[in-house]
Amino acid sequence: MKELWRRLRWMAHRDQFERELDEEMRHHLALKAEEQGSSEAARRQFGNVSLLKENSRSMWTWTFVEQFGQDIRYGLRAMNANRLFTAMAAVSLALGIGANTAIYSFMDAIMIRALPVQHPEQLVIVNWRAKVYPAVANSHSGSSYSEPGGGTTSPNYPYHAYEFLREHNSKFSTLFGYAGAGRLNLSVDGQAELGEATFVTGGYFEGLGVKPAAGRLIGPIDDKPGAVPVVTLAYSFWQRRFGGSPDAVGKYITINDTPFLIAGVSAPEFFGVRPASPPQVFIPVHNLGLVLINTYRDNDTRFTDDHFYWIEVMGRLKPGVTLAQAQSEAAWQFQQWVNATARNEKDRTTLPSLWLQEGGSGVDSLRRQYSKPLFILMTMVALILAIACANIANLLLARAATRRREMAVRLSLGAGRLRIMRQLLTESVLLSLCGCLLGIFVAALGIRSLTALLANGRDNFTLRAQLDWRVLLFSLVVALVTGFLFGLAPAIKGTRVDITPALKEARASDPRARKRRFGMPFGLSHVLIVSQIATSLLLVAAAGLFVRTLANLQAVDVGFNRDNVLLFNLNAAQVGYKDDALKSFYSELHRRFSAIPGVRNATMTDMPLVANWTSTTHVKIPGDTKAEGEEASTKLTQIGPKFFETMEVPILVGRPIDQRDRKGTQVTAVVNEVFAKKYFPGISPVGRHFSLGGSGGIDTEVVGVAKTARYNSLTSEVPPVVYLSYLQSTKNPPLVQMFFEIRTVGDPLALANTVRRIVHEAGPRVPVAEVTTQARQIDETIVQERTFADLCTCFGILALVMACVGLYGTMAYSVARRTSEIGIRMALGAARRRIVWMVLREVLLVSGVGLAVGSIAVWQTTQFLKSFLFGLKPNDPLTLGAAAAVLIASAIAAGYVPARRASRIDPMKALRQE
């Protein structure tokens, strides 16, 4: 304790102790001078005064802390003395660190950030997997995924399976279920909107450990048949629609035409367990039948059918229980239950098996969608940072050469090499910290820009990244590691100085430069330039691949006119319209929309074109000999009158769907070219019949053949499609929602308010949703490709500029160090063009080696991009050749300036400097 107090006193009264130390040293020198009779002899015998002071200070203070403070102060002075160098280094690092931080913030939001609940590490998600889709799952409502190694996985279970697992386990403190309800009609005081909803079991909030912000949360008493319909509001919805008033508890909210009592409000930070679709309201799962339109006539069987997989399950492990222990027990329990549901041998050979997944970050739909793209982007920005590090390392190597005399003086005065290395590394880390501070602003801008790119104008885009403490800590770690990496090589090189020759050499000279012949040495700086060019080639090639992919997608012929079409969604079934009344409501709106000034045509469809929507049904073609269970299939779209005229899809044979195709008449259809060629090869299908829905389905007459138009995406093959009048539709499921398409003379969005007014007059409780244009809707299907193209182009340009700056700096430094040699060559008669070629030859050699290394890297790594490309191969020769040509041209441009400067050196001045 005394030692600590003594050191703290020294730090507090440092100036006083320094004066006393100086006085003590003078006193000892004076005594030695009296003994020796000469002050010079006394100094020689006394030793190095500075070193003795350092030893004395080490007895009074913490040497490391003192020296570290000195290193920081010296480093700051050095940065201030070289402001241009500091600014260039800081900006380069800011771009690299900022880009890494921005991409990492999205990775944190999607893959790392834990749910804001109690002990999220104890949560697990209950999934099943099977080698092929299980035959016992006759009906499936939810999600399923194809695994990379083959097979299917899904989080959905029959309700009885959930109850069985909940009652027969010893490893979970609780199991609870939930299911997505989709977007429901939420009406407060007559003002309706569409909002996401989630059905939850009674133990949902208790199992997650969520506390109410107001009132109470849904509990087991609410999740029973016949219980009073109650709802828990999300905090954001409560703030937006009720102004955060506690009086909202006890009031009623109308959900899909059914009043629900507001029981309470969830915690402010809670957004459900699905980061991709945070709900506005939570509804007890047994109230499902009150709000869901009974589309498939299955609402009553959800809780009794052991072959209907629909509810998702999460659990909380008991303290001390591992995931493997819970997996072993739960998998065995589920296997016993699912075996009992098998009806035949086919069911038994494809039974699913249960597996548990860590659930602390919630359901992984966002991770499945964005994880691979983010890893690719993270790799790219890491390469950008590597280029920046190589650039700064090159600059520091050049500075180390000019500081040889300084290092030699330090070493001659007794400074240790490790001490000097620490000083140089401190300067590097200070540079990287400056870059980190600027990088935070770059990251904030990058997060905003990337969010805008991914959202593409969508109001319901839910992925939100932010600069929280984890992201800032990541930035700090990156800055420290970066500073160490780019400063290490220059620090080692700077301390490897032969003291005597270094003290004797002139400031403008360099012994190694004088040893250079007309041939070119290949030093560390050249290795760094090679690595920069190789990395830049990789990034430029990737940018080229993504740009060409986007160009290929944008060049796809969609088969209709996408321009000047307003697109929006109406769902009148949610507020009570049914059957003929629903069709009449949509027909009246269609008539009124068609009469709007500036509207050329209007129509409607149950699903928009090229929007990743799909509907499949079986067809039976007369004369088809397929065995039972092997029925032909087609895509089906229900449309309104004027569909083909509005979308400008040409009718090749026959007529389009029009007002003649109504209820009570012969069911008619228009088919696309793919359907006609596949099911009526070599003959005209017009006037022929087929059974829609398979054997025993609806007899349907083909009245026209439409030109092939893209159905659900730009990348998939166009399938057979049947266009059916919604007025004649008797298909299961019945008609529910409709998308209206209105072709306008001018800007489609200018009519949005007029459309809202008309809909409000016709049905005040029917909200107009998803207002957009057909062109923007198609663009949303390729938002990932466009984001990749935009970002990779920026990264490629940035890498190219950094590599050229590095090459320019290296060559300019090389020319400066070889001034004498070039002066002698010119004095001996060398022509200017030979001097230019001498410098450019070095540029071409370095660039050639870089391109060779980069080409190997490109050839090996672009295979990982295969799933993101369209219309070209990963090793597309045209793209790779163009990338190499761009790099060569850029390298020559970067090297020409130093080469031209070298050719204009005055031989006399160069020789005088030497």
Image (cartoon, grey):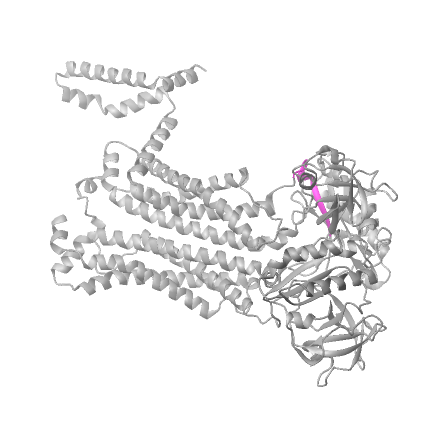
Give the residue at x 13% y 52%. Answer: 909
Location of residue 350 by image quarter:
bottom right
**Residue 142, image x and y in percent?**
74, 55
**Residue 398, image x and y in percent?**
28, 47
Residue 222 to residue 549: above or below = above
Relative depth, front residue between 196 and 138: 196
Location of residue 852 by image quarter:
bottom left
**Is residue 903 toward the left or the right of residue 551 in the image?**
left
Q: Which residues are magenta?
A: 116-127
**Is residue 570 toward the left or the right of residue 507 in the image?**
right
Give the residue at x 27% y 63%. Answer: 841
Relative depth, front residue between 103 and 37: 103
Residue 350 to residue 697: above or below = above
Give the residue at x 83% y 61%. Answer: 579
Residue found farthest to the bottom: 682
Q: Does residue 606 appear in the picture of this structure?
A: no
Q: Does residue 509 appear in the picture of this structure?
A: yes
Location of residue 609 by image quarter:
bottom right
